[in-house]
Image (spheres, helix red, strand yellow):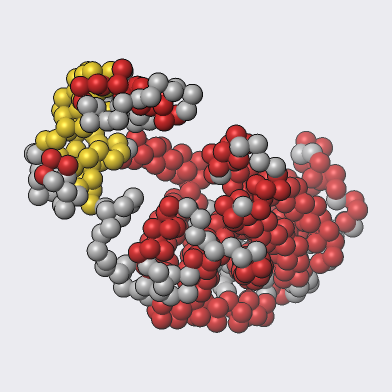
Amino acid sequence: MGPLNSCDDLPVTSSPQPPTQPTEPTGHNDHIHAGHGHDDHRHDQVPAPGHSHGHSHGHGPAAPVSKHLRKVIAAVLIPFAVAVFVGMVVLWPGGAPAHERSGVGFDRQTQQGRVVALEQVDCKSVNASQVPTTGNVTTPEGREARARQTGDCKKATVEVGTGPDKGRTFVEIVQPGAPRQLEKDQEVVVAYAPDAPRDLQYSVVDVNRKLPLAVLAAIFAVAVVVVGRMRGLFALIALVVSFGVLTLFILPAILQGSNPLVVAVVGASAIMLIALYMCHGLSARTSVAVLGTLVSLLLIGLLGSVFVDWAFLSGNTDDNTGLIHGLYPDIDMSGLLLAGVIIGSLGVLDDVTVTQTSAVWELHQADSSMGPRALYRAAIRIGRDHIASVVNTLVLAYAGAALPLLLLFSIANSSMGSVANSELVAEEIVRTLVGSIGLVASVPVTTALAALVVSADRPGSPAAAAASGRVRGGRGRRRKR
């Protein structure tokens, strides 16, 4: 892999200059980094490698590793990238398979609509066909039935805005206790049931949230670009590509009947290669992060496969997965669960491996005399802090997603053992713990790989000396100006 720099790592083009004064031992150079005002007389000196005065002002691009090491990294990553490409070609689905709509849940025809009129009506007059309440309001059913007979309902006139029946209107009755209330001129999503009687073919199923979501996405994009600049722009491009791989390859390939685990591994690897190299540049540093992420993904896949089978997790636990299984009975639902574990862990893995690799590289630039063991010990201390925060983040993310379910168990006064044993919660436990194990393992693995690679080039090697000379020489002349 060539020593190409990422978008904001501008190369130094000045020619190298030989040292004019002898360098001091490592132990006497620490004060150069401590302060600027007391060491201005040293600005014309060339510090020892790893102790450049320029580091007290800011870090430049990392010196490239030797040509031999680049060949070794390329010998590992190029076959892997080729295998990912071949896997995508072999498994490419060519689109999701067609099926006859069931009219259930998300699998129904929808159109856009708008509430053109809204009026208050007596619930009793519009719910005449409902069974009268028994008067027992201690149950949710009794309270709902009482409200339908005594409360005020909304009668909404909705106009269909898209499709063959554009301009057609229908009436929607909104009960007083309904979680979704309608307003005049509100944009809504309407479901179309062609087999139903004409008066019942259309119904409101949701509100149209496209505008607020688009505005929020625009604010997010602007914030990323303003703060991250070119890195932020490339990160947004990588995000779009990742969603493209997910929607154009992973999801259709699973629906076509391919093994979800294999599809997830190939798709996640493609996302990893594209996102990391696009965001962080084509360099040895990024390649080490890719290797660390790959090893961790393999570990997550192995552990997930073992414990999904051992815990007898079917992956078919709610209405959505039940609908998928009903429409496509050939899909391996437990494999789909495992695929979700791998894809869900990938984003956090990227963060951990890139951070650890960067930490090792910066430590080496600060003190190039550190060997691989010293680099590993210093960087792993950073990694331990990262592990604590990332694992906590992952657990809380899954707990937040399952919060309504946990509330139901709390209302039922179920014991912790009963809650954990239910398949719904067991899936989240396996997902969280397997992903967390992979994250924890990625820290020492990536740190060890980075320490071995970056310390393989000694300060006296031609590649390191030339690169170090370019950085020092360029900075020296800038200071003299």
Closer to the camera, 419 or 137?
137
Q: Position of residue 241 (x, y in %)?
A: 41, 60
Residue at point 41%, 72% (across, down)? 330
Q: Position of residue 363 (x, y in %)?
A: 76, 56
The image quadrant that residue 102 belongs to is bottom left
Closer to the camera, 128 or 207?
128
Residue at point 27%, 30% (across, down)? 130
Q: Residue furthest front?
A: 134
Residue at point 16%, 29% (across, down)? 157
4 w.r.t. 92: above or below: above
Q: Is residue 466 left or right of residue 170?
A: right
Q: Is residue 380 left or right of residue 91?
A: right
Q: Position of residue 49 (x, y in %)?
A: 77, 60
Q: Position of residue 355 (x, y in %)?
A: 66, 54
Closer to the camera, 51 or 40?
51
Number of marks: 0
Residue at point 55%, 78% (across, down)? 80
Please state, as top left, top right, bottom left or bottom right, where the N terminus lies in the image: bottom right
